Image (tube, rainbow, N blue to C red):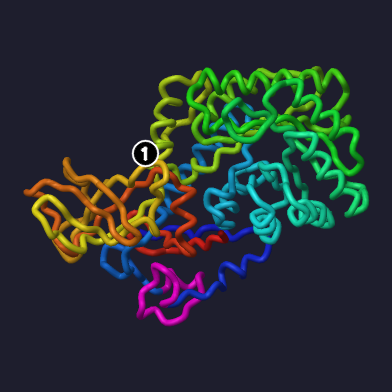
Amino acid sequence: MGMSRLPLPPRNGDDIAGFTLDALTKGIPASAGRLRLDGIAARGWNLFRGDLPLPAATLRADILAANNDWMAQFLTANGLLIAPHGKTTMAPQLYAMQHAAGAWAITVATTQQMAVARHFGFPRVVIANQPTGRASIDACFAALSDDGFELHVLADSLAGVAALAAGADRAGVRPRPLGVLVEMGAVGGRTGTRTREQALAVARAVVATPGLALSGIECFEGILPDTATVDAMLDDVLAVASVAVAEGLFPPATPIVLSAGGSAFYDRVGERFGPAVFGDREILKVIRSGCYLTHDTIGYESAYQRILRETTLRLPPGRLIPALEVWAYVQSRPEPTKAILTAGKRDVSHDSHLPVATAWFRPGSAMSGPEPIPAGHAVAALNDQHAHFALPSDSPLAVGDMVALGIAHPCTTFDKWDVLPVIDADGAVIDAVKTYF
């Protein structure tokens, strides 16, 4: 079942296409020799034929495309934009899919991640952190030397603005200032101002600093416990933005950015920011979800089910589906109710939830394809390279069978892989994704 290749990024695409794969690359067969990444499809490998060593983290090309299209339709239907968290995948090929579907920017967390996005030609980046330390701050101002590159960073304190001001002095004031979004937070949460008054003080300090420009107001709501807390934070963002407009803090004739950044509550962001109006000023209402493209089996699936139950926003046909799996072999069945799988902490996320077995397959058997895992099978623990797999004594699984592990956190699965094979619905390897962690 043939599928088209993933797009390459707008610039320096041969850095990816020409990346050398060989037996030193995790997930590549020992017999592969040396090959370019863009030559992987020509090898004719198939996951279910046993051509790849396991564990292998795989991406389904058709599901990636469907998820990307679902989100694009959702954004258009509800008047929203997206600046997806690039730190989720650190994969410029996947950024290119998101960019082609209309992503307003790529969001990152560090200046190294910014450098990746800039190197591969993505024209607008949001660093969703307050740059700290001389090296990082200077990297932000140095990036402005590229006339085709637009950068926005966060600030949540007067000290943070002062550090950016010192960076502007070192760089020399440029015709194009560094965009700054004031970050709001919640008591007990992560970064961000804790009150509206603090946020306005930061906004005023940005406006008073040569080399900086106030882009908008933002928050990160993704780790908050419930929708009521999320709504309260979003209302704070709107209130601060309203006062900032009244005080004339935003540069004239430029859009005002309202943004929030998680993958669990983007519906609440749309519902709160959607009706916002500040006179005749243009408002960019930007969500920053990163996990929608691959989705997952556990955490974000649960959040997605809440969205389906509760949202009043318009939802497109279809739904988000997990596109990322980690496949492992049954390596040992040392006890009647225990098996050991060939995947562990170095292969799959475990920070928020242990992986969940979703399917199994026996290479060389009469099985036409993977089948759902029977009831009673569960990952009980992970070591570095092994999964302890609890199963019923009458389980059909035997040594050499393949087990698909659904994940709970895409971010901390991607960072374990330098290259991820891209497969079609029949398991044929049709491409590969290069990451830059």
Please indicate whether residue 412 sits to the left or right of residue 156 in the image: left
Mark 1 residue element: loop
User: Residue drawn 81% across and 24% down?
Assistant: 281
Indicate the quadrant containing the N terminus: top left, top right, bottom left or bottom right: bottom left
Locate residue 117, reporting x and y percent.
Answer: 66, 55
At label 1, the amino acid type is Ile
Q: Which of 138/242 is in front?
A: 138
Residue 220, compared with residue 17, is above or below; it is above
User: Residue drawn 40% across and 59% down?
Assistant: 346
User: Residue drawn 66% across and 57% down?
Assistant: 112
Residue 284, compared with residue 44, is above or below; it is above
Q: Which of 179/38 is in front?
A: 179
Residue 277 position by quadrant: top right
Residue 159, compared with residue 184, is above or below; it is below
Locate residue 288, reporting x and y percent.
Answer: 60, 38
User: Residue drawn 57% across and 31% down?
Assistant: 189
Locate residue 109, reporting x and y percent.
Answer: 63, 47
Q: Which of 48/141 is in front?
A: 141
Mark 1: give few (<14), some (14-19) or many (20+) Cα within 10 Å. Answer: some
Please indicate whether residue 369 sits to the left or right of residue 334 in the image: right
Locate residue 222, reporting x and y percent.
Answer: 54, 33
Indicate the quadrant containing the C terminus: top left, top right, bottom left or bottom right: bottom right
In the rendered image, residue 382 lying in the magenta stretch gets the answer no
Residue 31 position by quadrant: bottom left
Residue under circle 1? 298
In the rendered image, residue 30 lying in the magenta stretch gets the answer yes
Q: Which residues are magenta?
A: 23-42
Count all numbered tags in the image, as a single digit: 1
